[in-house]
Amino acid sequence: MRLARLDKHLGMAPLYPLSICLTRLKAAVAMLFLIVTSSACAQPLPSDAVDGPVELPDTTVSQPATAAVSRVTLRSGDLPNVQLSAELLYQILAAEIAIQRGELVPAANTTLALARETTDPRLAQRAVELYAAIGDLQGALASAEVWVRSAPHDQEARLTQLALSAAAGQTKGLVAALIEQVDQAPNMTEAMGRVMNILKRMPDPEQALPLLDQVVQGSVAKGTLAAHMALADMARATENYPRALQEARAALALEPSSEDAAMRVLDYGLPVDAATALRNAKAFARNHPDARQLRLMLAGKLAEKGDVDSALDELALMSAEFPEDFDLLFMRAQLAYRDQRLSQARAFLEEYVAVQTQRQAAIAAGASDAGGALVDAYTMLARIAQDQGDPDLAIEFLGRIDEPSAQYAARLRQASIRAEQGRVDEAIAMIDALHAADQDEQLIGVLTMSQILRKAERYEQAIERLEMANEDIPDSIEIQYELGMLLERESRHDDMEKYLRQVIELDPSYAHAYNALGYSLADRGVRLEEAQELIERAHQLLPQDPYILDSLGWVKFRLGENEAAEQYLRQAYQISPEAEIAAHLGELLWVTGRRAEAREIWAQGQALDANDPALIDTLARFGVEP
């Protein structure tokens, strides 16, 4: 259960899933005893250290139920020594149980109160996690401040507090604290990296560069390579390319052989003066032929500018200078393929295959990466063969893959190609003949078969296969979600809802399950309030997902909230212009009297996909000619 996507740079551990609720509660009791014991509380107990039923000592249960923490003894370098009480035990367990129930607000409030009362830094850190999970920045910051007071020498606590202060836009004292961090750091590059990570959290990115300037000017970092590089990167983040280029050039002047600085001069110089940036990069490459990353970047930038010939020439020159760098051949093939030079790409790949085959034969099995390299090559050769209209050759290339870890996927791809040829029964037989090495491969095979049957509009057969697989692989979110989608298509709405609710129960953070169920209700015009709640939950989990935005707009339209509906539908269409979204937006415009706009949107939808069922149905209902 992913309660939140906590930033690993803040040092926050993820919250625990429901599946380990009991273990977590046991660990909470263990942590309590660590808090209240004396010399034994120097190190926390692992979360799995309590194995079996927890029995409290007699001295604990004899405490009055209303007893409070009456004494906190602090010793430098140690965890606090807190007198145990039944009330303290109750509050910690109540907070943990609330977490498992998804009631994070009261859990966070209780944990912060306990952290303040006991001065235990682990409780303060836990409170930071909880407030971050519910998006309460001020609560997280308040908890981080308690954490720092409880563990003033804990670098993680201090960095977390600084990061949260920056995220909250609180600049008072921030520069001084960052200068202190830089001045005390043994490694300047790492120190400037931490400063960058903190300042990048500022809600107004334009504030970050001036603050970084102040930190650099006031610290020992002034004039160093790390400082110029950091300033260049921060200026780039705010799209201040002239300043970014200025700092990158200063870094390169300070250390003329720095490949990292030269790469920044190229990257940040392109928007300012592309010709000069490319010319300077070529000069650096000639003077520093070992600068592999810069030369690869140069080839990529040349290709982006449409000069594929020069990009290929740069890679060919590298290949001539470093004949043992076999990856360059594959890169040349990729570049040629992206430019749709299919024959040239195939020639590069065949040369690459020959080299890797020789390497594979000359070295003991598993002692090189030749096997994996051949998988990549044959996969791309198969793609080229398909693009050239030769599916049989594509299947032949995939058949050459003998790497055990890739064989199953290659055979599934062969089956998919056969299905694309209309040979569906042959494709199904190919999948049935495979032997999955484990449950993961079995799941991939089942889902591939389902997709093949769905595209062939053999829905009942797909459902039957998935139901059988659901017996073999119980509690598979993927299978149950796919079943729900197919059952919805077959108008078996009760069965569809059963499976989607099982998905939600298995993974309460699976946004698309909420969305699918909510959209189905909204589209049928039933239980609209419930539909809205489901879709809004999905929107909380994935706020920028265009399909969820479309669903939210659609349910708002069904509820008569046309202004909000239009806002969401337009946002969805802007992110992902698709025919079905165009159908929904056009219907809203038509119903609200803006028929010319509706026709225009529908026309755009037809240009995107004239065969979209939702669009066809919408046009038919309103009597609009395609």
Image (cartoon, rainbow, N blue to C red):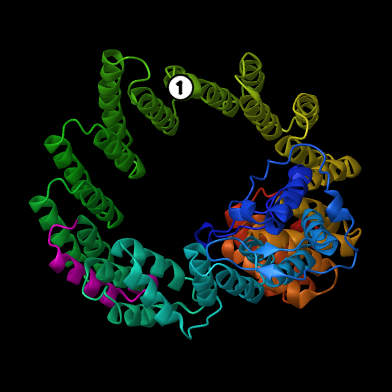
Q: Position of residue 542 (x, y in %)?
A: 66, 59
> How would you rate the neighbour count of disc 1 (Cα within 10 Å): few for under 14, some for 14-19, many for 20 or more?
many
Q: Could you say which quadrant of the image residue 249 lies in? A: bottom left
Magenta stretch: dominant SS? Answer: helix
Q: Position of residue 260 (x, y in %)?
A: 24, 58
Give the left or right position of residue 612, taking residue 623 as reference: left
Q: Nearer the viewer, residue 577 or 368?
A: 368
What residue lies at 70% left-to-right and 38% top-to-bottom?
478
Q: Position of residue 476 (x, y in %)?
A: 73, 35
Which residue in the protein does label 1 denote?
Answer: 398
Name the kind of residue labelled 1 in the image: Leu
Is residue 251 located in the magenta-colored stretch of the structure?
A: yes
Q: Say above or below: 192 vs 2.
A: below
Q: Residue 294: in sight, yes or no?
A: yes
Q: Quadrant of the C terminus?
A: bottom right
What residue lies at 67% left-to-right and 67% top-to-bottom?
131
What residue lies at 58% left-to-right and 58% top-to-bottom?
12
Q: Position of residue 366 (x, y in %)?
A: 38, 19
Give the left or right position of residue 113, taking residue 64 as reference: left
What residue lies at 30% left-to-right and 23% top-to-bottom?
353
Q: Residue 624: in sight, yes or no?
A: no
Q: Which residues are magenta?
A: 235-258
Q: Say above or below: 416 vs 175.
A: above
Q: Nearer the viewer, residue 571 or 315?
A: 315
Q: Residue furthest left?
A: 287
Secondary structure state at the residue bearing disc 1: helix
